[in-house]
Image: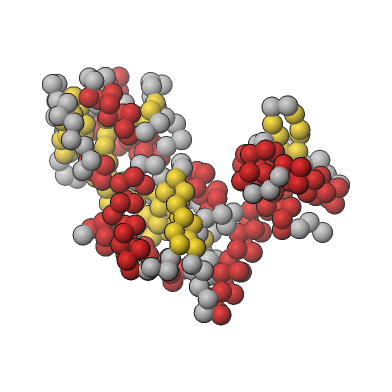
Amino acid sequence: MPTLRQLRYLTALADERHFGRAAAACHVTQPALSMQIRDLEAELDLVLVERGRSGAVLTEEGAALAERARALTAGVKDLEDFARERRGARSRRLSLGMIPSVAPYLLPRVLPMLQAAIPELDLKVRETQTAQLMTELAAGELDAVIAALPLATEGIEAVPLFDDPFLLASPADAPMAASDPRSLPADRLLLLEEGHCLRDHALGVCEISDLSTFGATSLTTLLQLVAHGQGVTLLPQMAAADISDPRISLARFPEPQPRRTIAMAWRGASARKRQLKDIAARIGAAHDG
């Protein structure tokens, strides 16, 4: 019978596509992880991984099994949390994922608040793009995620925290009026690279199907491009407080302002829902305050 350890190793390999990186993610040696994967293949009489010099690629059977393994490992995590709750021994560690366009701006406000309100909480933060966060949440590797709606993943509950309006950032020596975002020239619009939900929100607000132009990996890079007159961008209001560059002009759109909604999500089967709802309420209040 496959073991939980083997299934966890398989999902790590599915994510990393490399035995060495998967082993590092699981905090084991590469030979140990490789041996467990081979034992799993022998147990199931299936080839799960195509091994090559450049890495490891799951076969069709391996990918299908990895998806099922994610659900199983998440279920085990929720069972462990349920048992702790029943014993009154609530887990101190909380693994929280955040998207890059939220984490740098929200954490300075909420971390001190959570440390003061729940001093026993051992918060571990993971920052990456929405799709990867939701995969890790479904697999039980994260307890909760803070990202922008929509978060359409089966078995996930989401609670809105706050709305985050968009501002127009343009060069100060040639400021652009913030009127209708749909009127922004596509050839002047600077966005994050594909995979960032902020890019998708900006395209939706401007009613542009897609852009084949330069994509930045961070808001910091986008703002540097704006400061040097390379174009304009839509900036979340929560990021505007950190801008002191006189070369950048910020303008607010008229009502109804384009905006995104930031939410906190967790597995619907999580035994920690009461604690997570309390934390969500505290974060929402801290932002509004």
Q: Nearer the viewer, residue 151 or 4?
A: 4
Tell me: 235 left or right of 246.
Answer: right
Q: Position of residue 81 (x, y in %)?
A: 56, 69
Quarter of the figure with the N terminus: bottom right
When the figure is inspected, residue 88 is found, relative to residue 108, above or below; the finding is below
Quarter of the figure with the C terminus: bottom left
When the figure is inspected, residue 4 is found, relative to residue 32, above or below; the finding is below
Q: Residue at x 40, y 52 (%)?
A: 146
Tell me: 28 left or right of 108.
Answer: right
Picture quadrant where residue 189 is located:
top left
Picture quadrant where residue 199 is located:
top left
| Residue 161 seen | no
Q: Position of residue 188 (x, y in %)?
A: 27, 21
Q: Residue at x 30, y 37 (%)?
A: 205
Q: Residue at x 31, y 59 (%)?
A: 112
When the figure is inspected, residue 110 is found, relative to residue 173, above or below; the finding is below
Q: Nearer the viewer, residue 44 or 81?
A: 81
Tell me: 115 left or right of 43.
Answer: left
| Residue 122 seen | yes
Number of marks present in the image shown: 0
